[in-house]
Every structure is written in structure tokens, then in C-alpha cells.
Image (cartoon, coloured by chain):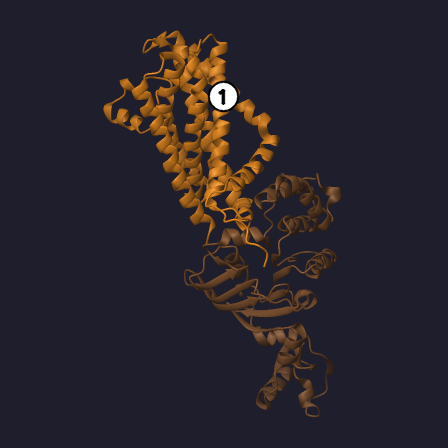
Chain colours: A orange, B brown
């Protein structure tokens, strides 16, 4: 018998990069359409709300409404470029294309598949999340230098929602069930995140929900980094929440996807 | 061949249940190194479940599994790194090209970056897909897709290859082509475990055949040993209307002759033992199919 090869670790960077290389190759075919919708969507929101509501309200919480919404929509862009691709992509790959079955026959484990998918979608969200900000800058927003940290916030939030999407896909027996998650969970989260209007005006119970809404923490953090300036303690809290969200969802996604793939 | 050393695959008392169904019911099987073992059995015998357990994609409820000296499921990632798997269901990424798929898998199989390109080229050559290297999978024919599926499992030169029903649903021409590909592996000394429900396939390719039925191995040997042991040297085939055949079968049962239905006829096996006593009929050499039916039963489950 030949010399034993080195022990493989539970999570191997090579395996994670290998799975990601497949996604990157695929992305080479789709980047145009993905980029189009990632830039056009927030622009439309920005124009619609900025011009529509902007005519009614000039400032919210002391900042210009266009700045308010330009920073808020970053979280929306992250949600749309992470949770949805993760849900649909994962479902299609394990159910219809059986791509994950092929990976699992090679030296790759479910946890590594989840890590790769989540990291890749997180990186994409880290890039596309900036689109609304760039559009807002084109419309006259003057960001603080701390805005350079926004991609990192988008990445963190994107990782969490990507893992959430993988988890949902692994739990859902059919693609129709995504409607429950979409309408019952994601739409409310997206509206009570302080994106379009401040949550302070909402009933207290809903405000409490916002406190556990990762999008709310993303919005607050981005707004501080870009407009208000960093407020160390609360902002560390927001960042910590996003890290915890990502870690918990990653564990849950690995656990459910593994159960789905291994008999 | 005479390869010694520990077996490439060892399963001992392996049981796998899916709810009330027991797919694998106490399986014992050893595959020596350097051998092409054909796992032959009817649909539903538990072959695919067995294959999936060897990659830890299914976890046994009882028993022990060792692959290339690694204990499963704990050390399965190590085992998977050293073997190649060709699944029954086509799970190729249809939107990627042959080269892109092989490159992804060369990475997953830890082929060092400097050797990846050469490994991909070699796999394309084995599968005879060099001209199609940059063709997307959804534009390939069924036979080409199957060859690519095999190439994907060989990109890292594994010393053990699992082939799950490698030619199911393919034309005879494509089948011949795949058979020579598999024969090439065997000739190169790679250990092969191939599941199939095609008797001819097992007879053509396997050094050793293990017959599987109802989740267990019911017989094992070279194709000719199995024929000799379970169907004898010759079969005596009697044609006639159903009533006549039923009568003959009753007579055979009473006399203790082994028989099997063979289309519109009844075949009496081990015919050489009953010379003189048999009715009018045709003699032919016993086949692996005769032995297979004797071992796995005539009824479709």
C-alpha cells in the first residue's frame, strides 16, 4: 500500500475552493443578467421612493431622505442577492441537478458544500450590496470615509442570509413552500428594517421584532458608516449580531443539508 | 493476477433500512485489490444502496465497512479521495463544458494545481472527448455524457473505481464502447466494483461475479464457476404450448430436475446429468443467465 496521505480536515480549504470554483465558472455565464438586476432594482427603488416620498418628506431622523433611503436599500440589495439565490440555487442543485450528490462522492462533505455556497454568495452580496450606494452617490450623496467598510457589512449580512437560504432549501420539500418563507418572513423583515421609514414610529411589539431582524442591524450599521458616523458601542453590537446570525444559520444549514443528502 | 494484501473493499454484516424496507440485509463482501468484481442482481436487490454506502452517502444501520483500509463512515473522506465514483444517475452540470467539469473535479480530488491541466487532458483522452473538450454538456449525446461521467471519476487516477450500472439505458454501440473503456481500467490494474443488472455485462467484464438478491450476496465466483455450479454444463430447452410445459415442469419437479422458464419454453438445467431421461428438445451450453435465474428466482418483485 502506498504511503498514507495526510489526514484530511473536517473543513478543507481545497474542497471549499473547489466547490466555489464551480460557482465562479457558472457565474461567468450569468454575470451580465445578475449585474443588470442588481443595479437596476435599487435604482428604481431609489428613484421611486426618493422622488415620490422625497417630495413629501425632506428629512428623516435628521438626514436627507435620499440619503436615508440610499443607505437603507443596501440591506435590500443584500437580501435579494443572497437569500433568493441561495434558496433557489441550493434546491435546484440538490434536487434537480444532483450536483451535490456528485460532490459528496468526491472528498467533499456537506459542511464544505454549505461553506462554499455561503461564502461565494456572501462575496457576491458584498459587491452588489454597494450598488445602491453608488447610485445614491451619483445622485449627490457624499459618504464618509468609513463607507469603505460597507462591503464588509454586506458580506457579513449576505453570508447570514445565504446560509438562511440554504437552510430553507434543505428543509422545504418543494419549491412552492418558498412562498411561505418569502411572504411570511422575508417581506415583513424587509419592511421593518428601517429601510424606507424609521422603526421608531412602529408599535413596540414590532420594534422588538426589528431588534432581531438582521436587516435592521445591517441598515443601522451602513447608515452610521456612510452618513451619521460610527457610534462604537451600538455599531459593535450591530456587527456582533450579524456575525452571530451568520454563524447560527451556517450551522443550521450544514445540519439540514447533510440530513437531506445523506441517507 | 495474484495481487495480495488487504482487500480494497470489505463489508461485514452490513444492514441498511429505509423505514420498513430493508434494502441491504446483512451483506458480506470482499473485493480484492486489482480485481474487477461485478455485483450482479435484479433491480431492487440493494446494489445502488451498497454503492452509496461505500461513499458514505448512505449510512449503514449495522455492520462494518472498510474501503482502501479506511473505516467508514468516519474516515470516508480519505477513502473518497483515493477512489473514483461513476454514479448511475447522470449528475453532470449541464451548463458547463467537459473541460470545466473535469477541472472542478480535479480540484475536488486534490490534484495539485501544476498537474491539473494534464490530468484533465488525460481524462478527456480516456473518454475520447478531446474534440468535445469545450462543448457544453447539454449539447453532448447520451453516450458522450456517460463517457464524461466516467472520465470525471478517473481524473485523479484512482486505484479503486465504483461503477454503478455503467451502461444502463444506452445503445448497444455505446455499450460496447464503454465496455472497452472499463476493460482498459481493469487491464491497467485498477480495482473495479461494478454493479449491473445486465448479465452479459458481468460475464464480459468481471473477473469475479457476486450475485446479489434481496440485500444479500447469494453466490460468488468467476462467471464460468457460477454457471457450472448453478446451471451445470448444458441446458435442455423444450418448446411447447403452456399446458405441455406445465405438465413437464411438474414432472421435472417430481424428478428433482432444476428448471427455469425461458420465454415460450422450459429449460432443464444440468441437462448433462439427465441424459436419456429427457423429452425431445434442444441442447445448448448453460449460460450465466441460467445461473442468475436459478439464484435470484423467476419472479419479479
Q: Which residue lies at the image location 58% right of the left edge and 75% below the top edge?
A: B295
Residue B298 visible? The answer is no
* A82 vs A151: above or below: below
Which residue is labeled 1 in the image? A41
- Indicate the quadrant containing the N terminus of chain A: top left, top right, bottom left or bottom right: bottom right
Task: Please tell me in which quadrant of the rendered image residue B121 appears.
Answer: top right
Q: Position of residue B161 (x, y in %)?
A: 61, 57
Q: Position of residue A206 (x, y in %)?
A: 27, 26
Q: Secondary structure at mark 1?
A: helix
Within 10 Å of the Cα at label 1, are there few (<14), some (14-19), or many (20+) other Cα atoms?
A: some
- Residue at the bottom extreme? B276
Q: Which residue lies at the image location 65% right of the left edge and 77% below the top edge?
A: B225
Total numbered labels placed on residues in the image? 1
Q: Position of residue B267 (x, y in %)?
A: 66, 80
Residue B168 visible? The answer is yes
Q: Position of residue A88 (x, y in %)?
A: 49, 37
Q: Is residue A230 left or right of residue B119?
A: left
Task: Please tell me in which quadrant of the rendered image residue B174 appears.
Answer: bottom right
Who is closer to the viewer here, B7 or B256? Answer: B7
- Residue at the left extreme? A204
Who is closer to the viewer here, B299 or A245? Answer: A245
Task: Please tell me in which quadrant of the rendered image residue B117 appears.
Answer: top right
* B139 vs B266: above or below: above
Who is closer to the viewer here, A262 or B140? Answer: A262
Chain under callout 1: A
Amino acid at each position: 500500500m502506498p504511503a498514507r496521505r495526510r489526514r484530511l480536515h473536517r473543513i478543507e480549504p481545497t474542497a471549499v475552493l473547489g466547490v466555489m470554483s464551480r460557482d465562479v465558472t457558472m457565474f461567468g455565464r450569468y454575470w451580465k443578467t445578475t449585474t443588470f438586476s442588481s443595479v437596476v432594482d435599487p435604482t428604481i427603488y431609489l428613484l421611486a421612493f426618493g422622488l415620490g416620498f422625497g417630495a413629501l418628506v425632506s428629512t428623516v431622523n435628521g438626514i436627507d431622505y435620499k440619503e436615508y433611503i440610499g443607505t437603507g436599500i443596501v440591506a435590500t440589495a443584500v437580501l435579494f442577492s443572497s437569500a433568493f439565490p441561495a434558496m433557489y440555487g441550493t434546491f435546484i442543485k440538490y434536487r434537480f441537478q444532483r450536483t451535490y450528490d456528485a460532490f459528496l462522492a468526491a472528498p467533499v462533505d456537506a459542511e464544505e458544500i454549505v461553506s462554499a455556497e455561503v461564502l461565494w454568495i456572501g462575496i457576491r452580496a458584498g459587491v452588489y450590496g454597494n450598488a445602491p450606494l453608488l447610485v445614491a452617490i451619483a445622485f449627490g450623496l457624499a459618504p464618509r470615509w468609513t463607507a469603505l467598510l460597507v462591503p464588509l457589512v454586506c458580506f457579513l449580512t449576505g453570508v447570514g442570509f445565504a446560509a438562511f437560504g440554504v437552510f430553507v432549501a434543505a428543509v422545504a420539500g418543494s419549491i412552492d413552500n418558498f412562498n411561505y418563507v418569502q411572504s411570511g418572513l422575508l417581506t415583513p423583515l424587509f419592511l421593518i428594517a428601517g429601510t424606507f421609514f424609521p422603526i421608531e414610529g412602529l408599535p413596540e411589539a414590532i420594534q422588538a421584532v426589528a431588534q432581531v431582524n438582521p436587516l435592521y442591524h445591517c441598515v443601522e450599521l451602513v447608515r452610521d458608516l456612510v452618513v451619521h458616523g460610527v457610534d462604537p458601542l451600538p455599531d459593535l453590537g450591530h456587527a456582533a449580531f450579524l456575525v452571530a446570525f451568520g454563524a447560527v444559520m451556517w450551522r443550521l444549514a450544514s445540519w439540514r443539508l447533510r440530513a437531506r443528502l445523506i441517507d | 493476477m495474484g495481487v495480495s494484501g488487504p482487500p480494497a473493499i470489505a463489508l461485514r454484516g452490513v444492514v441498511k433500512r429505509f423505514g420498513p424496507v430493508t434494502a441491504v440485509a446483512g451483506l458480506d463482501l470482499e473485493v480484492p485489490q486489482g480485481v474487477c468484481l461485478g455485483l450482479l442482481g435484479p433491480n431492487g436487490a440493494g446494489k445502488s444502496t451498497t454503492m452509496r454506502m461505500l461513499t458514505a452517502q448512505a449510512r449503514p444501520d449495522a455492520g462494518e465497512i472498510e474501503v482502501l483500509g479506511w473505516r467508514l463512515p468516519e474516515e470516508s473522506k480519505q477513502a473518497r479521495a483515493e477512489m473514483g465514483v461513476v454514479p448511475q444517475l447522470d449528475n453532470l452540470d449541464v451548463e458547463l463544458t467537459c473541460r470545466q467539469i473535469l477541472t472542478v473535479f480535479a480540484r475536488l480530488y486534490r490534484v495539485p494545481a501544476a498537474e491539473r491541466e494534464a490530468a484533465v487532458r488525460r481524462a478527456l483522452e480516456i473518454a475520447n472527448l478531446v474534440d468535445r473538450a469545450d462543448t457544453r454538456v447539454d449539447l453532448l449525446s447520451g453516450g458522450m455524457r456517460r463517457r464524461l461521467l466516467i472520465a470525471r471519476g478517473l481524473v485523479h487516477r484512482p486505484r479503486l473505481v465504483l461503477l454503478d450500472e455503467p451502461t444502463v439505458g444506452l445503445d448497444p454501440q455505446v455499450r460496447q464502447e464503454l465496455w472497452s473503456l472499463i476493460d482498459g481500467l481493469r487491464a491497467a490494474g485498477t480495482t473495479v466494483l461494478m454493479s449491473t443488472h445486465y448479465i452479459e455485462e458481468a460475464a464480459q467484464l468481471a473477473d469475479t461475479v457476486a450475485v446479489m438478491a434481496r440485500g444479500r450476496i447469494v453466490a460468488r465466483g468467476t462467471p464460468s464457476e457460477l454457471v457450472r455450479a448453478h446451471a451445470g454444463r448444458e441446458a435442455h430447452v423444450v418448446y411447447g404450448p403452456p399446458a405441455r410445459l406445465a405438465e413437464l415442469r411438474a414432472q421435472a419437479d417430481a424428478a428433482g430436475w432444476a428448471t427455469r422458464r425461458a420465454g415460450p419454453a422450459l429449460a432443464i438445467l444440468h441437462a448433462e446429468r439427465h441424459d436419456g431421461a429427457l423429452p425431445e428438445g434442444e441442447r445448448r451450453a448453460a449460460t450465466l443467465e441460467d445461473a442468475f435465474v436459478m439464484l435470484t428466482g423467476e419472479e419479479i418483485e
